[in-house]
Image (tube, rainbow, N blue to C red):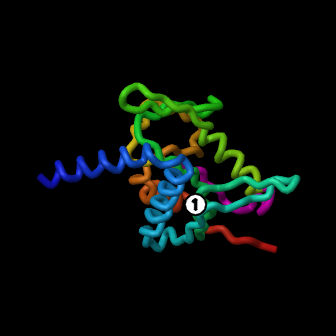
Amino acid sequence: MNLLYELLLQYIRTEDLFKMDPQTIGSIGENRTVGKLKQISSDELYGIPLKNVYLPVGDGRTSEVDVLFVTQKGLFVIESKNYSGWIFGSENNKTWTVSYKGGRKEHFYNPVMQNKSHIKYLEKFLGKNIPIFSLIVFSDRCELMKVDITTSSIKVIHRKDLIKRSQRYARSTLMFSISS
């Protein structure tokens, strides 16, 4: 009975998301990602998650990072995607696709390219002496059906794997220090 209740609740949540505008849905996903990062309580990775960080790109324009996780191991640039459905995409395609039940499809800008852009502006602003990690974090409600990533430094994961993946990065990286 408990499992049936959970499944029904998940279905209702998914149906309610279809009634919301994309910015609200995205903000919910970002908040869930920040909440997951706040659960990290490890000596090997301590950090502060910052949501909606605006980086200067020039000409008065900015680039918005969904979540920037500032840690003693470096900066985690996180592009948060709060989709349900099946996700299809490649590191080099300009757009990715989400396919919903019933056959409805939507295309969205490649989150890998989005994060590469964020990292470029972050390095331009801060310099290159700070380790920067790229994470594309999808909702646990979606299924990563065919996502082709060949660059080893780019990780596309579900939110449920965020803590484990972040700690794995932390174990493989020495602490950094900013010298003047």
Disc 1 on helix, strand or loop? loop
Question: Closest to the observer: 59 or 104?
Answer: 104
Instruction: Specify the farthest residue to the top.
Output: 103
Residue 7 screen position, x and y as percent: 24, 47
Q: Quadrant of the C terminus?
A: bottom right
When the figure is inspected, residue 53 is found, relative to residue 22, above or below; the finding is below
What residue is drawn where x is 43% and y is 48%? 139
Instruction: Say which quarter of the image contains residue 113.
Output: top right
Q: Classify residue 110 by image quadrant.
A: top right
Horizontal side, residue 170 vs residue 2: left or right: right
Residue assigned mark 1 = 173
* Residue range of the region highlighted in magenta in the rendering: 124-136
Residue sitting at x 55%, y 35%: 149
The image shows residue 151 at horizontal and vertical percentages of 60, 38
- Magenta stretch holds residue 83: no
Of 165 and 93, the residue lying toward us: 93
Q: Is residue 7 left or right of residue 76?
A: left
Q: Judge whether 174 appears above or below 93 on screen.
A: below
Position of residue 138 relative to residue 178, above or below, is above
Amino acid of disc 1: Thr
Q: Nearer the viewer, residue 64 or 76?
A: 64
- Left or right of 168: which side holds 77? right
Rendered residue at 58%/44% (across/down): 154
- Whether residue 102 is visible, yes or no, is yes
Q: Which residue lies at the image location 48% right of the left edge and 59% below the top edge?
A: 33
Residue 174 seen in the figure: no
